[in-house]
Image (cartoon, coloured by chain):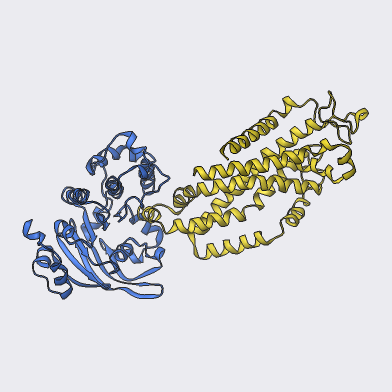
Chain colours: A yellow, B blue
Amino acid sequence: MKQLRIAAMGVLVAIFSASLAADLLSPHPYGEQYRDAVNAAPSRAFPMGTDDMGRDRLSRLLHACRVSLLLAPAAALVATTLAGLLGGAAGYLGGTADRVFLRLSDLFLSLPWLFLFLSVRSLLPLNAAPAVSAVATFLLLGVLGWAGPARVARACACGLRQSDFVMQAKANGRSPMRLLLVEIVRNLRPVLAAQFWLAIPVFVLAEANLGLLGLGVSEPLPSLGGLLRELENYQAVVSQPWMVAPAIILIGVTGCLHLVLGWEEIRR
Amino acid sequence: MTESLPRSDDMEAAASGATLLDVAVSVDYFGRQAAVREVRFSMERGEILGLIGESGSGKSTLAMAILGLLSFRGGKARGEIRLQGRDLLALPEREMRQVRGRAIGFVPQSPLAALNPTLRLDGHFREAWRAHRPDRNGWREVLPDLLRRVQLPREAEFLRQYPRQLSVGLAQRVLIALALLHNPRLIIADEPTSALDAITQSGVLSLLAGLNRDLQTSILFISHDLVSVARLSHRVAILLHGELVEQGPAVEVFGNPQHVYTRQLMATLLVNPLLRR
């Protein structure tokens, strides 16, 4: 099992570093169209073939990984930070603040995710720049994804509120803000770290879902979701099986992240 | 250490005579009325008052009431708690926060649980300092003397340690140092030695006695350990089921107990420690 985890870590490092170095590794610009080589099979010039607009699939895959795998952790960071502050404050303060927090997070948890994203994402202008749409999509995921991790943080903060060291800090006359940040949120870090790692694959998949519906990152900027959209065409997949590569990468990254996360938990 | 930290409340204290603390209080918990019933006692400057009572008799409740922390445990105090003439129960939370740690220091029962496990020792001093002082790094100047007073190592490596790396005895000394950081008039020590072995316990008691002697710090020493109370206290108060059944100079209470419960307590002592003092 340990070797498996090390291998998973290796795969993740390889994919992340390849996506970071996308500009160097890509044989072609990701938006460049080669009109005379549309839907081409893999060749020396196009190692993974080209798509229906004549763009190099390998270059697009590398850049897609960069967009998804860098912005998903950023979104997870936003979500877990919000979760730590809101859940920590609610658990620490208790009373009315806690009740308001519980109802609000209930609301966010019970809303159908996909429809929520669809309606909020559709508020963005359709002609927004690709980079803006990418950042906006993941920012939305981060801002809307706080409720689940925040409930976990809140439950832990409730326990911390009654702890001796929080009482001692109060007896030292510490301000409520310092108490929240130093005594509560600091002690929530292991829990928040686990929530952070769990959120990354969820957000990668959520972006892919949005991408399938055309509401993710906008063209010509590739994202894993955008590339997966091509798989809707069954005939094309049968005739060009290399189109499946983004799906394999996505499954691989998600699986590897969960393997590595399991390792983190055992070490803790 | 103490000379460099003038007590801000000296003027006020001078006006109100020698009485430091005047308590006349009842405490209700949610769902449990009168956990403490009309307990009255007062403390003079530089006095050590030993508060004796069995578990659940309301000792810690009284400590929490004086610190204004009852609401966090679901309790409410009625009556008056006057510190140098100022009624603490009437103070708004913002002002009460200035009293905690600055005018009243607190030494808790379980030293290791009372330190934040994710914070190094110097972080504890930094945070406690920042609670009452605007200068961020002033604690670095007062710390060496403070650590020497409570017999803790003064090396930087010691302060870089996490609480889990300390023994219980060292942790309790750290907490006493934290309670002394702002040089308070009163220290409330809530069973500070109950988690310690006999030798460490003896060391902490000597330390508290020394603080009282050298700094004239008053100590409300809460304990169920009669020997510790007898060794340390000038006066003693006995708490039973939330009521104060007897109080007086230690020599009198230990030498000639009046209340039935006090007599029962004294009968548990194999050798009356005051006779050996």
- Of residues A13 and A123, the one nearer the viewer is A13
Asked whether the viewer can see residue A223, the reply is no
Against A107, residue A5 (above or below) is above
The number of callouts visible is 0
Q: In the image as oriented, which residue stretches furthest toward the top?
A: A44
Q: Residue at x 64, y 40 (%)?
A: A256
Asked whether the viewer can see residue B271, the reply is yes
Q: In the image as oriented, which residue stretches furthest toward the left?
A: B275
Locate residue B47: give its quadrant. Answer: bottom left
The percent position of residue A244, horizontal first and vertical second, equals 80, 39
The percent position of residue A120, horizontal first and vertical second, equals 74, 53
- Picture quarter with the N terminus of chain B: top left
Left of B259 or right of it: where is A15?
right
Left of B106 or right of it: where is A194?
right
Left of A3 or right of it: where is A163?
left
Locate residue A248: give its quadrant. Answer: top right
Left of B97 or right of it: where is B256?
left
Against A147, residue A29 (above or below) is above
Q: Residue at x 73, y 27 (%)?
A: A23
- Picture quarter with the C terminus of chain B: bottom left
Locate residue A8: give its quadrant. Answer: top right
Against A43, residue A161 (above or below) is below
The percent position of residue B9, horizontal first and vertical second, equals 27, 54
